[in-house]
Image: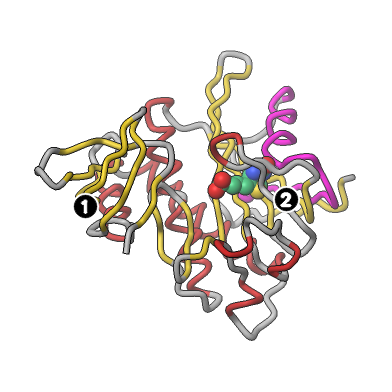
Amino acid sequence: MKIGEVHDANRKIVGRTILHFDAVESTNETAKELLESDVEEGLVVWADRQAAGRGRHGRAWASPLGGLYASFILRPKEAHAWLLGLLIGMPVVKALRHFGVFAGLKYPNDAVYQDRKIAGILSEGVYRHDVYHVVVGIGLYTNVDLDKLPADVQPKATTLKREVNLFVANEEFLDYLLNQVDDLYSRYRNTRIEFLLKDYRGQCTTIGKRVSAMIGKDRVIGKAYDIATNGALVIADDQGKKHPFFEGTLEILK
Ligand code: BTN
């Protein structure tokens, strides 16, 4: 059920209108349903909990009360969809740091603190009425007790509440986060994406680490070396051969 609607005319595109729901199946799905009508770019769907939150690779995203679950609608060039999904990790990490969790950006766009995931992003491209849209969904474990997450997730996750002895209301977190996303999207529209990718490369804490990745059926072990202009993570194996990696299982080795 919709429980509120907030307008902020100071934002350029993202977050000028926020639709607040108490519970939905998935904010990404609600945003996609809204695309059937003529909605503005930057519209945000925010829910207090999700009954069927979705993560990347078809995984579930546990969405108990206390977490922050929001999706927004963008209309980038289709060729930029993947790169934009990477870039959105930067404002998420910036917001976490602002509120006291010195998170890092694990390729492609997970926010991680001390090897535990605190936020994830699911970016989905969709055509509606011949127009290409990207629905970007962000899930953040803000005011969640770790024991409210599934048992298999708990050892690999953390929450703002666990790391910082300060209560931050989701409304306040979302407000700051949307300001950062709006700024990033405006830079995306006004600068060359390669410049933003350089920022991303500098912020991605996976670079320089030894990693293990599944690329197709092959396991590649080596050093995460670079971000290619198409947004792939380049892994240099022990023989020096370079392998581009986009999606799949990526493990950071000690
Ligand atoms: C990941 O696997 O890391 C991505 C998780 C993305 C979760 C968010 S919560 C808001 C939005 N709605 C969803 O169903 N998923 C995304």
Q: Which mark is residue 246?
A: none
The reply, left or right, for residue 106 in relation to residue 191 is right
The reply, left or right, for residue 239 in relation to residue 1 is left
Mark 2 or mark 1: which comes first in sequence?
A: 2
Q: Nearer the viewer, mark 2 or mark 1?
A: 1
Under circle 2, the secondary element is strand
User: Where's residue 160, x and y in %?
Assistant: 61, 72
Instruction: Give the quadrant of the N terminus.
Output: top right
Under circle 1, the secondary element is strand
**Which amino acid, by three-letter code, is at mark 1?**
Lys
User: Where's residue 63, x and y in %?
Assistant: 73, 53
Q: Is residue 43 visible?
A: no
Crowdedness near tag 2: few (<14), some (14–19) or many (≥20) residues, C-alpha within 10 Å: many
**Which amino acid, by three-letter code, is at mark 2?**
Trp
Q: Residue at x 71, y 56 (%)?
A: 150
The reply, left or right, for residue 25 in relation to residue 212 is right
Q: Residue at x 60, y 81 (%)?
A: 164
- Quadrant of the image occupied by residue 172: bottom right
Give the magenta range: 13-37
- Residue bearing mark 2: 46
- Quadrant of the image occupied by residue 239: top left
